[in-house]
Image: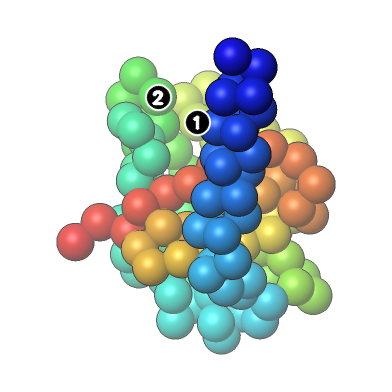
Amino acid sequence: MRLIVLTAAMAGVFLCSAASSDAKELRKQNQFLDAVAGKKLVSGDTWLVISPDGKINGVGRNNAKLTGAWAWSKKFWCRNVVVGDKAFPEDCLKVSIDGNQVTFARNKGKGDAIVYTIAD
């Protein structure tokens, strides 16, 4: 039984690493703008639009208004956001894209990640 569980776990790790190998890290502002600017990004009941002019607008959990601003810094997307009445601290995120899936990894890629789908 342990062999089956171990084999399944190893297969899962292999498949996850193989799937993420297709992801392309967006290291330059023009790559980021080409990939996501002006498009609706959706994750669960949250959605947002990142404008080329440095603004962020959308809807967060519980239908709370989401607003913010962003700037590119070296190879990171840095943003300030307010969701409802809660202001979140500035964070710079590593961004990658795989098809219509955009992954934002907090703390310059060292923190939690959230995946958004580019809506049609």
Task: Give the number of marks.
Answer: 2
Q: Secondary structure at mark 1?
A: strand
Other-residue count near label 1 (Cα within 10 Å), few / some / many at <14 / 14–19 / ≥20: some
60 sits left or right of 82 in the view: left
- Quadrant (top left, top right, bottom left, bottom right) of the C terminus: bottom left
Q: Which residue is mark 1?
A: 83
Hey, which residue is sitting farthest left in the picture? 120
Q: Secondary structure at mark 2?
A: helix
Mark 1 and 2 residues: CB-CB less than 8 Å, in contact? yes
Other-residue count near label 2 (Cα within 10 Å), few / some / many at <14 / 14–19 / ≥20: few
- Sequence order check: which comes first, mark 1 or mark 2? 2
Q: Is residue 114 above or below residue 5?
A: below
31 sits left or right of 2 in the view: left
Q: Nearer the viewer, mark 1 or mark 2?
A: 2
- Asked whether 85 or 46 is in front, the reply is 46
Is residue 79 visible in the rendered image? The answer is: no
Residue ID at (51%, 58%): 19
43 sits left or right of 29 in the view: left
Hey, which residue is sitting farthest bottom in the picture? 30
Is residue 33 visible in the rendered image? The answer is: yes
Residue ID at (57%, 73%): 24
- Quadrant (top left, top right, bottom left, bottom right) of the N terminus: top right
Badge number at residue 120: none
Q: What type is the residue that disc 2 sits on?
A: Arg
107 sits left or right of 30 in the view: right
Q: What type is the residue that disc 1 sits on?
A: Val
Residue ID at (41%, 31%): 60
- Asked whether 64 or 25 is in front, the reply is 25
Q: Which residue is mark 2?
A: 61
Question: How far from the left and from the top, in percent, is residue 103?
Answer: 54, 54
